[in-house]
Amino acid sequence: MTINGWLQVALFCAIVLALVRPLGGYMTRVFQGERTLLSPVLAPVEAGLYRLAGIDARSEQSWLAYGLAMLAFHALGFAALYGLLRLQDVLPLNPAGQSAVAPDLAFNTAASFVTNTNWQNYGGESTLSYLSQMLGLTHQNFLSAATGIALAVALVRGFSRASARTVGSFWVDLTRCTLYVLLPICVVYTLFLVSQGIPQTLGASIEATTLEGATQTIAVGPVASQVAIKMLGTNGGGFFNANAAHPFENPTALSNLVQILSIFVLGAAMTNVFGRMVGDERQGWAILGAMGVLFLAGVLVTYASEAAGSSVLNGFGLDGGNMEGKELRFGIVASALFAVVTTAASCGAVNAMHDSFTALGGLVPMINMQLGEIIVGGVGAGLYGMLVFVIVAIFVAGLMVGRTPEYLGKKIEAREVKMAMLAILCLPLMMLGFTALATVVAAGLAGPANAGPHGFSEILYAFTSAAANNGSAFGGLSGNTPFYNTTLAIGMLVGRFFVIIPALAIAGALAAKKTVPASAGTLPTHGGLFIGMLVGVILIVGGLTFFPSLALGPIVEHLAGSAGQTFAAGG
Amino acid sequence: MLASLRPALVLFLVLTAITGLAYPLAMTGLAAAIFPAKAAGSLIRRDGAIVGSGLIGQSFTSPRYFHGRPSATVAADPADATKTVPSPYNASNSAGSNLGPTSAALAERVKGDLDALRAENPGAPVPVDLVTTSGSGLDPDLSPEAALFQVPRVARARGVGADRVRDLVVAQVEGRTFGLLGEPRVNVLALNLALDAHLRQ
């Protein structure tokens, strides 16, 4: 580790913190339907859209209607994307002549993008047409991100309202998020990315004759516009197979900094939206504080571990850290930071191959996802995931002092705690259940490329990433098989919707409750004590659930590697 | 569910048109107008012919050129399309090695490369980036140390003094952005073009 390295981390944190309030204020105005800077341009578009769709912008929905609207919208998106992938060979904008995507891969990819996971079982430049990338993937990147934010806003309304029957309108939240938040940022962001060297063209691949006379076919495409929303919407699905490690997806150290900022910035600002809407910004800062503690711990472990390098390679007299799978322009620190950020949020873009990280460096991304990506998290998804943990923490605190638990003036009762536990339990069920299945059936065991404990880690990482809707991978796993395409898709769908629906049910139940005034016995939820309590509950729940699986994978690999042991594939 | 059908359908279609077509197409037009060279892939031409992209590494094997980092990219086997063969710096199929820290295959590969490099330049410490593959397999850069490590070989192959080659390397070193971000680096293609331009023989 170097001073320069920590300065790069500090700069990143400082910029995120500086953006939380301005963006939070802007987004709060957007979701409360107020006028914003962009209203003169966008309000007519918005109004026209509502007229066309028969939406009354003032009419709100109950949590159930909100959820059904969201599901109907996703069903449509799923079907359209699946169809597009299956038919891409006969549709336009296919200069490389890609063939139709196979049914199981199309199913997996559709599930992947509709759930904001963006798991890549496809190799972008070798599988998809430009039309599929733009109309299918870019578009789902926007809408799955907007959906995540909309749901978080609905849950926040549950906390901020009293004796209310509605939690907002899904249609309005979706539209306003897309038009006022995502699109304007992406337009500016795309141009910045092109200025750094990311291609944005509909031209076909380039044939170059190298200095040594060989032919090099260089894939290009409308990359920048997709990278902008892939990062901002914490989607993470790359235009290219190597994702943000590819020089055309992330050409410079500056583009790298802005990309990791854009993964975090909306999620971090959502905590401020939460604080503002419940009428006490300190509540938002407390949530962000708990996230920050977990985040910095993750950065410390990953950075230290990658900077120290692999014991096996260091044994040959190499130093300089673990550079296998990392790009030189980013080096150790920017690769480690990216890995922690992308798994803390539910982005899943990678600028280095996580599969080649040291055992402990690869452990942190796994833990981040297993905890449910609540450290800033996916846009929106991180906030509602964290609020679910808040409910459990409040419940535990209530048990300790023998009082009815309350949060922000809302009594937390049996229904909320049950729903919170349902949302928390579906993740380990998918992650550990499918991992266990894959380690006993032949189709599952055929997947890993690495032998020994690292092979197990590859499987565990895949199902963890899928259920957490992250999308990053230990890429050695051959996931493009009927077994993995299907099981991973199920993991993604359950991991998305079985968290969303309980979270919405909580929103509905909370909105209907009266607000009780704070009394001397109320636990303050904006101070260090509460942050400590929350972090403790997260670590105990996550730690107890996942420690055994981590012991079988990265932990035993770390011990074996320290002893100089290696594992040969096929042996 | 039925009441949701019209809003769902209309919003889906219109938002698809905006985000999936209008946005990328408008961006393509704007990018081409403002940054035409970069939007097209930062291509480098020599004597009118495209020799590569300034951002994408390419394979160098001749001792007369500086070599980039090892690359793990593959291509379809011409003999059997279901298999793949190594194809370093294949810019239409980016990939890393995905070998884990306890992989015997990784240890073996690194050991082999190390032995070859130590034989080529005995006594000098081998920079780690010369024996590790990048994440994309298309890394255009080397660390300054890794470029300097190759100076004796290139000078020998070109029959020129090592000092002249070293000066060219030093002139190509890019520092950290704003003195803070990223790592110091040398673009291998740019370095080799400078080599050809100044030491053509």
Image (cartoon, coloured by chain):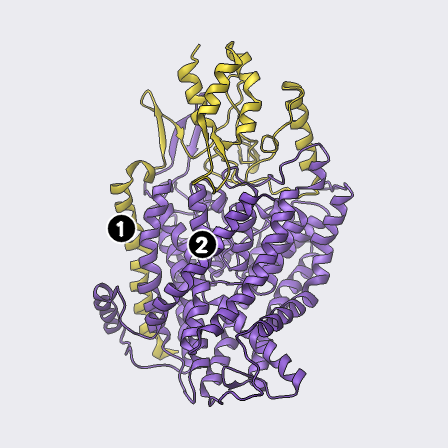
Chain colours: A purple, B yellow
**Numbered mark located on residue B190 in the image:** none
Would residue A307 appear left or right of B102 to someone viewing this image?
left
Residue B63 position in % (x across, y down):
54, 17
Q: Residue A368 appears at what percent x and percent y?
A: 59, 60
Nearer to us in this view, B82 or A43: A43
Q: Which residue is mark 2?
A: A261
Of tags 1 and 2, the one toward the viewer is 2
Report which residue position mark 1 lands on: B26
Give the percent coordinates (x, y) of residue A534: 60, 72
Amino acid beneath label 2: Leu
Front-lying residue, B165 or A22 = A22
Q: Residue at x 46, y 69 (%)?
A: A271
Q: Nearest the camera: B145 or A232? A: B145
Location of residue A468 in the rendering, given as x and y in whole percent from the top left corner: 56, 62
Q: Is residue A75 visible?
A: no
Give the SS element for disc 1.
helix
SS at badge 2: helix
Q: Quadrant of residue A487?
A: bottom right
For the residues labelled 1 and 2, the Cα–Cα distance comes to 25 Å
Label 1: chain letter: B
Q: For the view shown, which residue lies furthest in the right direction? A: A563
Could you tell me which quadrant the N terminus of chain A lies in? top right
